[in-house]
Image (cartoon, grey):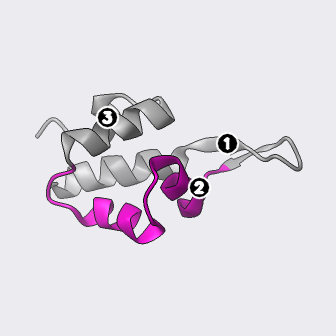
Amino acid sequence: MSDTQYNKFFSFIQSYMVTDEKTGLLRKITMDEVAKRLGVSRVQVYNYFKSENISAKIRAKIIKEFGAKEEDLMSDS
């Protein structure tokens, strides 16, 4: 994953908003919540950010769980 791809992936996750169950207000998703939705550990989520190549299986899961598009996660380069 190039720096640009890393930045796109990280930016997507950092900008993802969820509704807080207690207040009903929008807030940023936590890494624990990202990990839970992907069925992996929080450490593994951070490893995805560092990865040279996120597998097609993981990209598909992110697209499904977060309503992302391929271009939200990967750069054109």
Q: What's the residue type where badge 3 is placed?
A: Ala
Q: Residue at x 15, y 55 (%)?
A: 2
Q: Which residue is mark 3?
A: 60
Q: Which residue is mark 2?
A: 33
Q: Quick check: 23 left or right of 72?
A: right
Are the two marked residues, 1 and 2, in contact with CB atoms closer than 8 angstroms? yes
Q: What's the residue type where badge 2 is placed?
A: Glu
- Nearer mark to the viewer, of 1 and 2: 2
As rendered, which of 27 and 4 lies closer to the eye?
A: 27
Q: Position of residue 30 (x, y in %)?
A: 60, 59
Q: Residue at x 23, y 49 (%)?
A: 5
Residue 58 drawn in magenta: no
Q: Secondary structure at mark 3?
A: helix
- The local crowd at label 3, few if under 14, some if 14 to 19, many if 20 or more residues have their Cα within 10 Å, is some
Give the extent of the magenta segment. 28-54
Q: Residue at x 54, y 54 (%)?
A: 36
Q: Residue at x 19, y 46 (%)?
A: 55
Q: Position of residue 57 (x, y in %)?
A: 25, 40
Q: Earlier in the sequence, mark 1 or mark 2?
A: 1
Q: Position of residue 59 (x, y in %)?
A: 29, 40
Q: Which residue is mark 1?
A: 18
Q: Earlier in the sequence, mark 1 or mark 3?
A: 1
Name above or below for residue 12 compared with residue 43: above
